[in-house]
Amino acid sequence: MKPSVAREDDVTVAARLHLIVGRLMRTIRQHAAAGLTPSQVSALVTVDERGPLRISALATHESLGAPAATRVVASLEEAGLVSRTADPEDKRASLITLTVSGCETLAALRQERALGLGAQLDALSAGERRLLERALPVLEKISHETPH
């Protein structure tokens, strides 16, 4: 298969998207993260969306090496936000799940971060909000795809 050649329009869109996402992330990070690192927050979200899952699956989804994923899970487990249980398909492996405290922490983080963008969203017209809502599935898709 031949590698695709990016069109000039694609490069421009990618550059604008990179800048916009970076600015949005800075805005979001200005709000409380319950003392968690971005990697820990991302792992919590992944476990919430895809869990229960093995550390290897978490590492793959988060684009982390196994040792880094193990450290993130260990820190979340120490904080009482995730727990490990035996994988019924392979007793040598464990599955990571959110604890009640993990669910509550994640809900609080989502609420705080949503409030952080509230002023920007409030400034949008009804049409702009609808356009943004229609773009969300596309943004979600590209955020979950692994580049080949």
Image (cartoon, helix red, strand yellow):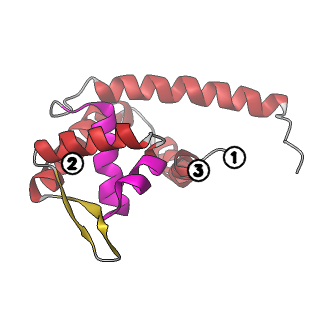
Q: What residue is shown with label 3? A: 145
Residue 138, how many percent across, how many down? 58, 51
**Left or right: 65 as drawn, with respect to 104:** right
Q: What residue is shown with label 1? A: 148
Mark 1 / mark 2, whichever is N-terminal = 2
Few, some or many C-alpha atoms within 10 Å of disc 1 (few <14, some 14-19, many ≥20)? few
Q: Secondary structure at mark 1?
A: loop
Q: CA separation, marks 1 and 2? A: 31 Å
Q: CA separation, marks 2 and 3? A: 23 Å
Camera-side residue of 67 and 108 = 67
Residue closest to the far bottom: 88
Q: Secondary structure at mark 3?
A: loop
Give the magenta part as a residue range: 36-61
Q: CA separation, marks 1 and 3? A: 9 Å
Q: Main secondary structure of the magenta part?
A: helix
The amino acid marked with disc number 2 is Leu
Of labels 1 and 2, the one closer to you: 1
The amino acid marked with disc number 3 is Glu
Image marks 2 and 3: residues in contact by CB distance under 8 Å: no
Q: Residue at x 51, y 50 (%)?
A: 140
Q: What residue is shown with label 2? A: 106
Of labels 1 and 3, the one closer to you: 1
Residue 117, how many percent across, how many down? 32, 34
**Left or right: 124 as drawn, with respect to 95:** right
The amino acid marked with disc number 1 is His
Image marks 1 and 2: residues in contact by CB distance under 8 Å: no
